[in-house]
Amino acid sequence: MASLYFTPNLARHTQCPAAELAAATVAELFERYFETWPAVRGFVLDDQGEVRHHVKVLVDGRNLRDRRKLTDDIQNNSQVYVFQALSGG
Amino acid sequence: MAKQLLVGTRKGLFLIGRHAGQWRVDRAELLGDPVTMVLAERDGSLHAAQDLGHFGVKMKRSRDGGATWEDRPVPKYPPKPEEVVDLDPMRGTPIPWDVKRVWALEASQRLGELWCGTIPGGLFHSRDGGETWELVESLWSHPDRKMWVGGGADYPGIHSVLVDPRDPDVVRLGVSCGGLWMSRDGGTSWDCYGQGMRAEYAPPDQAYERRGQDAHRIVQCAAAPDHVWIQHHNGIFRSTDGGLSCEEVKTAQPSAFGFPVVVHPHEPNTAWFVPGVKDQWRYPVDGALVVSRTRDGAESFEILRNGLPQQHSYDLVYRHGLDIDTDGVTLAFGSTTGNLWLSEDQGDRWQNVSHYLPPIYCVRFVN
């Protein structure tokens, strides 16, 4: 199971508890998460389903490579973090 | 007279009320996040559009006068087909199919009908009070939309939506930069009008191109809707035929540059502006903040300065930062410096409500 965490700053706007989910890519991980927490989608992804310009996603400590389709692979024990970028505020 | 004034700012929404003849801040809501547009519906609902920066645009509604707020659906662009090429005509860079800012929000006389203008140029329509939104495809897919360019922002945007009081199917739009558009069939089809607007920032042979005009703000007289006033990037224009054609106003004082304009709801020849030094500077002429008023259809202007700072004022008033009440007497405006002023005598005298608000994006009276 991969772990997904969100910046506490997002919790000011919408409920976004950490979760452990089975997924092979970041896209799959997010989709599974949004099934339970649908309101979080619009905070993280834009209208085209891409990661918002000022949102930072880290997969096992590395920046997400495919911010458009989120095809980055994840492992069984991956740690995925969603942060605010330092830009955009 | 209005019972309340809504003020959208860089750091939230402020509700201003009148108490014993004085207006003061009653409450601060949605604190910490920019509120780019507000709307009070006839049923008392308050709508607020937020720009959360990192986390995108959000919509809120209050049904208890602003005490509590609920999340509401956000207008959303459809998936962009891979084969569609949609580029900024100046830079050649892609126009994002993503709501970057809610820049206009208006209710029509039909219950539950709302129009929402956005950056990067999409117009959204709701028939159910914002429960669902539809992109107005006829405008978004109009070939001339590809000629629009960014004005105050990197991408074009719809900042003015005028629903004709005589017929809610007649809708006029102001676009920066894209001119004045009108639909006569409820948004099924659109045409660009505003013949006569002139762009100083374009080569001479393109100066009168209707689709390239940077109309900063467009308003119409509620009682005489064919009377349309336009505060444009390089001047003031006026139309008496519903925006089909415009005449440039040559008499504006102390300058013709500015963002906001309001027109008296019953007297189409009476309008107010907040002028500034033209575009490279954008602050009051000689550091003296004034409101200009015409009562004779721009034959002449009066300069209103009573109660306003006349030295070292660098207040800029954005396009939605000036409003007039339906009584035609009460006006308010707020600046990027966080100053808020109000007049109960058509601008002859101004009282300061606060010097300390965050930068002000929009002000709107609630009746």
Image: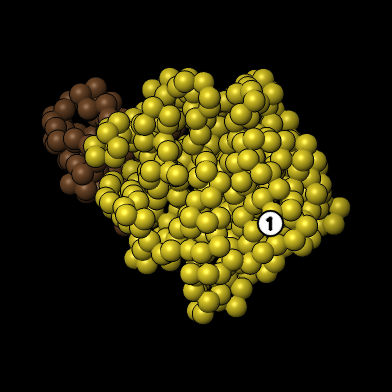
Chain colours: A brown, B yellow
Residue B34: image location, x then y, percent: 37, 50
Quarter of the N terminus of chain A within the rendering: top left
Q: Residue at x 38, y 36 (%)?
A: B47
Q: Residue at x 48, y 63 (%)?
A: B350
Residue B185 is at least partly visible in this image? yes
Q: Which chain carries label 1?
A: B
Judge from the rendering whether residue B13 lies leftward or rightward of residue A4; answer left or right.
Answer: right
Residue B295: image location, x then y, percent: 69, 54
Give the quarter of the image for residue A6. top left
Tell which of B95 and B355 is nearer to you.
B355
Residue at the extreme right: B205
What amino acid type is highlighted by mark number 1? Thr
Secondary structure of the residue carrying numbered label 1: strand
Judge from the rendering whether residue B20 lies leftward or rightward of residue B94; answer left or right.
Answer: left
Give the quarter of the image for residue B250. bottom right
Q: Residue at x 14, y 36 (%)?
A: A18
Quarter of the C terminus of chain A within the rendering: bottom left
Tell which of B123 and B1 is nearer to you.
B1
Q: Identify the residue position indicated by label 1 in the image.
A: B294
- Mark 1 nearby-residue class (10 Å; few <14, some 14–19, many ≥20): many
Residue A34: image location, x then y, percent: 25, 26
Judge from the rendering whether residue B289 lies leftward or rightward of residue B243; answer left or right.
Answer: left
Residue B147 is at least partly visible in this image? no
- In the rendered view, would you say B294 is above or below B314? above
Tell which of B337 and B119 is nearer to you.
B337
- In the rendered view, would you say B87 is above or below B287? above
Q: Residue at x 36, y 31 (%)?
A: B45
